[in-house]
């Protein structure tokens, strides 16, 4: 039980010490992953299907869907084009 408490305290401390720009980046990445997962579900596509139509490996697509990937604009554009809708709106 004591170990659990120490772990939670350490986790909270790490969160507090994380720079705001990194927190924002992670929030953006997670939002993109959630949107992409929703797009795949709506189209009845799997992770494997997305890998095939984008020419990427399943491992890379898995990283995209994990919510922490640092997407490039080129990758976002490619995904948007193959999915037939914008992944992000500015």
Image (cartoon, rainbow, N blue to C red):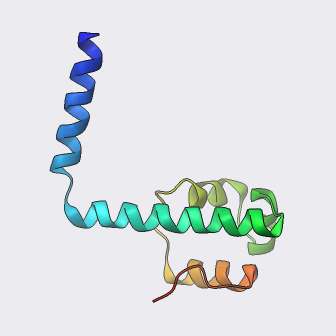
Looking at the image, residue 14 sits to the left or right of residue 45; the answer is left
Looking at the image, residue 36 sits to the left or right of residue 28; the answer is right
Total numbered circles: 0
**Front-lying residue, 24 or 76:** 24
Position in image of residue 88 (x %, y %): 53, 81
* Residue shown at the point (72%, 56%) measured from the top left: 58
**Front-lying residue, 36 or 71:** 36
Looking at the image, residue 21 sits to the left or right of residue 55; the answer is left
Position in image of residue 47 (x %, y %): 74, 58
**Front-lying residue, 43 or 49:** 43
Position in image of residue 1 (x %, y %): 29, 10
Quadrant in the picture for residue 61 = bottom right
Q: Pick the quarter of the image with the C terminus.
A: bottom left
Looking at the image, residue 25 sits to the left or right of residue 8; the answer is right
**Front-lying residue, 64 or 6:** 6
* Residue shown at the point (75%, 62%) measured from the top left: 41
Quadrant in the picture for residue 7 = top left
Q: Residue furthest bottom?
A: 90
Position in image of residue 63 (x %, y %): 57, 56
* Residue shown at the point (35%, 66%) measured from the top left: 25
Quadrant in the picture for residue 84 = bottom right
Taking 6 as reference, is 58 above or below it?
A: below
């Amino acid at each position: 039980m004591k170990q659990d408490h120490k772990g939670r305290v350490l986790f909270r401390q790490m969160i507090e010490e994380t720079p705001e720009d990194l927190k924002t980046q992670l929030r953006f990445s997670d939002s993109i992953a959630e949107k992409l997962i929703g797009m795949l579900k709506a189209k009845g596509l799997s992770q494997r299907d997305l890998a095939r139509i984008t020419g990427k490996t399943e491992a890379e697509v898995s990283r995209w869907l994990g919510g922490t990937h640092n997407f490039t604009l080129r990758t976002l554009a490619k995904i948007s084009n193959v999915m037939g809708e914008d992944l992000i709106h500015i």
